[in-house]
């Protein structure tokens, strides 16, 4: 399993390299990896403002329902696509998880908190349709990076009473087993008008673009912040963050860690020394995914340990 995961990570980290540059055995292994999953693309899970939200499913083949990662792409809530995240989900497939790769409304379609609403609807959709795709609704992990990390946190942490689920067609209160957060924003208000706000052009403009000129945008920013929802009973959270991140302050993950500790929630922070906003050295990516695998094994019931995953 360790060898396979290492190989998969190296593929994901060398996405810009031409296929011809890869050894034929590596290409065959990559093909074999995707052959072990049933791929169902572009399923419509929600309709809003004349827009259709779609998701792709990579379901592990087998008889038993599998633990599933709902993956949410980054891009500052203003850019990015699920298609652009295909290589990012490979490590989870290699670990034996099924994956649901989700798109959501960007700021040019709908301002905040539309992205949160969509991801909450995607979670509900997965629960409702789990049996059709051999997914286990009791072992759902939400994962993402940057803005996707923020959305993974809100998707897994906010209660239905927060009001983000009112446009979803599926009733009930879905439950997430764990959250994987790569350098996600935990305090939206901090980037909008807090201590970490910087003057343009040094600032990260995505926060302003996502919130727009809504008259209540300060309230929206607070309601959209994962730190608002930390409480006893939220899912276990593992965060990965470079301590020199120039876009999302490392302090966001530190504060989340402290809040989870106070609430008695299982948590872990993997710090990448000298790391920026992603772009970590391969060894640090390997370290991060090894920590993720160990964390999920400990906190998601029935998940295979690293030594036996993939067998």
Image (cartoon, helix red, strand yellow):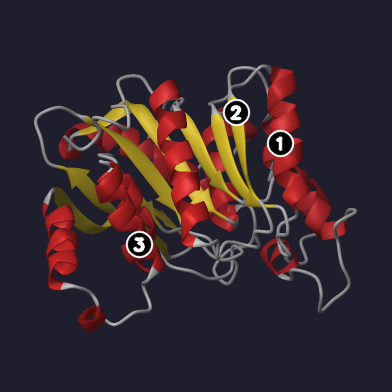
- Number of other residues with Cα within 10 Å of mark 3, as a class: few under 14, some 14 to 19, many 20 or more: some
Q: Is label 1 in contact with label 3 (beta carbons under 8 Å)?
A: no
Image location of residue 237, percent across then percent down: 56, 32
Secondary structure beneath disc 3? helix
Which quarter shows the C terminus?
top left
Q: Nearer the viewer, mark 2 or mark 1?
A: 2
Q: Which residue is located at x 37 percent, y 71 percent?
A: 14
Please tell me in which quadrant of the rendered image residue 103 appears.
bottom left
Q: Is label 2 in contact with label 1 (beta carbons under 8 Å)?
A: yes
Q: 15 or 147: which is nearer to us?
A: 15
User: Mark number for residue 10?
Assistant: 3
Q: Earlier in the sequence, mark 2 or mark 1?
A: 1
- Number of other residues with Cα within 10 Å of mark 2, as a class: few under 14, some 14 to 19, many 20 or more: many
Q: Which residue is located at x 35 percent, y 62 percent?
A: 10
Could one spot residue 188 in this view of the protein?
yes
Image location of residue 180, percent across then percent down: 50, 41
Q: Nearer the viewer, mark 1 or mark 3?
A: 3
Image location of residue 196, percent across then percent down: 85, 57
For the image, the number of numbered tags is 3
Report which residue position mark 2 lands on.
Answer: 267
Report which residue position mark 1 lands on.
Answer: 256
- Taking the image as shown, residue 288 lies to the left or right of residue 171, namely right
Q: Is residue 294 above or below residue 190?
A: above
């Amino acid at each position: 399993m360790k060898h396979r995961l290492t190989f998969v990570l190296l593929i994901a980290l060398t996405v810009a390299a031409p296929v011809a540059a890869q050894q034929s055995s590596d290409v065959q292994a990559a093909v074999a990896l995707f052959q072990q999953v049933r791929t169902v693309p572009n399923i419509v899970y929600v309709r809003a403002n004349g827009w259709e939200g779609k998701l792709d499913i990579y379901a592990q083949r087998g008889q038993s329902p599998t633990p599933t990662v709902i993956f949410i792409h980054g891009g500052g809530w203003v850019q990015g696509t699920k298609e652009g995240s295909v290589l990012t989900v490979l490590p989870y497939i290699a670990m034996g998880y099924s994956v649901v790769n989700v798109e959501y409304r960007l700021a040019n379609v709908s301002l905040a908190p539309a992205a949160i609403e969509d991801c909450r609807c995607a979670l509900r959709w997965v629960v409702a349709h789990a049996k059709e795709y051999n997914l286990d609704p009791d072992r759902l992990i939400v994962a993402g990076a940057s803005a996707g990390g923020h959305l993974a946190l809100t998707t897994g942490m906010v209660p239905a009473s927060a009001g983000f689920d009112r446009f979803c067609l599926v009733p009930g209160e879905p439950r997430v087993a764990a959250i994987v957060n790569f350098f996600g924003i935990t305090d939206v208000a901090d980037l909008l008008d807090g201590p970490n706000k910087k003057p343009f052009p040094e600032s990260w403009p995505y926060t302003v673009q996502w919130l727009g000129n809504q008259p209540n945008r300060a309230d929206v920013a607070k309601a959209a912040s994962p730190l608002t929802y930390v409480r006893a009973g939220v899912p276990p959270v593992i965060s990965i963050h470079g301590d020199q991140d120039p876009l999302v302050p490392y302090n966001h993950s530190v504060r989340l860690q402290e809040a989870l500790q106070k609430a008695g929630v299982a948590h872990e922070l993997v710090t990448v020394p000298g790391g920026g906003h992603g772009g970590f050295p391969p060894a640090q990516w390997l370290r991060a995914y090894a920590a993720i695998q160990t964390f999920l094994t400990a906190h998601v019931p029935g998940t295979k340990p690293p030594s036996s995953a993939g067998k």
